[in-house]
Image (spheres, rainbow, N blue to C red):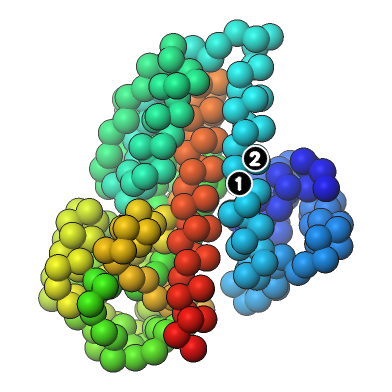
Amino acid sequence: MELRQLTYFAQLYREGNVTRAAQSLNIVQPALSMQIAKLESELGLVLFERTSKGMTPTPAGERAFELFSPILEQVLKARHELTGDGQEIRGRVRVGLVASATNAALADTLAYFIEHHPDVEIYVTTGFSMELVEKLRAGDLDCVVINQTFGQEEFAGRQILDEELVLATGVDTTLPIDSPVPLHALASLKLVLPSPRHGLRRAIENVLRAHSIEVHPRLEIDDTTVIELFIKRTDWVSILPASMVNRELLAGNLRVHPLAPPGISRRMLCLRDPSRPSATAETAFIDVLATKLGALQAATTALTHASTEDHT
């Protein structure tokens, strides 16, 4: 098993698409496919299934990502510590994030930098995607992590995560339908969602409209943390990112239910001004954030699938 194979595997897992993964890795598609095939052969496991949505991880693939992520994180740590002939990473990072990314992944990323890169000055702000893009355009931020719900061709983009959304409920809430939940059944549930100005709402409605499904939530709350608190205490439900609900799921405060194919997902991109050189500290920060988000998603997905199997 080679580090290169694990790196390629992790990138394909995050992208969910061979073409995008190969482009991100700056390699040709056959080379990526060959290394994934070698890894599967060595492990004796099928890690991906080719579906209409792209390359979908199998249960073995989900488990592999969960186990490999800490290894890759340690390699990332070692690489960054060796950057610049042993010189510590320095500088300032000004990052804008959509609120749904400010979960345990951000806290873990900040903790990592404080411990390993104490000379890096970090400024983090949150907001809606369009607001963050305007700050990036004005030069107030070095990069922004947003939901891909619109095109911004003037910026250089890097995919951070292709993440499935899940139906989240309180632990005492009983759904009137079985898991996985069909998309058409969402219209009959007591949904609380962000407003249409929120990137998550756009991602949800884009998929539902494509299948001629409309939802009309009676409650709209843009603060996803408040949504989590609300559904914990009531019988209302919401559609939230897998990485976001991991902490409450592990604490036993929430339950999550997978959505039936084709499901709903959101792509998170990191945008930056291509005319400005990318600083080492900025790249390192986004690398760690992407790893932390991917690990949370993988952990939640594994728990969701395990829970579904337990009830079948």
Identify residue for label 1: 69
Vertical relation: 237 (above or below) 198: below
The residue closer to the viewer here, 95 or 166, is: 166
Kindly identify the residue that appears in the image at 36 percent across and 45 percent down.
Answer: 104
Vertical relation: 118 (above or below) 72: above
Kindly identify the residue that appears in the image at 41 percent across and 22 percent down.
Answer: 114
Indicate the secondary structure of the residue bearing disc 2: helix
**Callout 2, which amino acid?**
Leu
Q: Label 2 to label 1, Cα distance in Å?
A: 5 Å
Mark number displayed over residue 134: none
The residue closer to the viewer here, 148 or 92, is: 92
Where residue 39 sits, quadrant-wise, is bottom right
Q: Is residue 210 visible to us here? A: no
Q: Position of residue 110 (x, y in %)?
A: 39, 30
Q: Is residue 281 left or right of residue 86?
A: left
- 2 and 1 marks in contact (CB < 8 Å): yes
Identify residue for label 2: 72
Other-residue count near label 2 (Cα within 10 Å), few / some / many at <14 / 14–19 / ≥20: some
Kindly identify the residue that appears in the image at 29 percent across and 47 percent down.
Answer: 99
Q: Is residue 25 left or right of residue 213?
A: right
Q: Position of residue 153 (x, y in %)?
A: 49, 44
Where residue 248 sits, quadrant-wise, is bottom left
Instruction: Please tell me how many numbered marks the rendered image carries.
Output: 2
Q: Is residue 126 visible to us here? A: yes
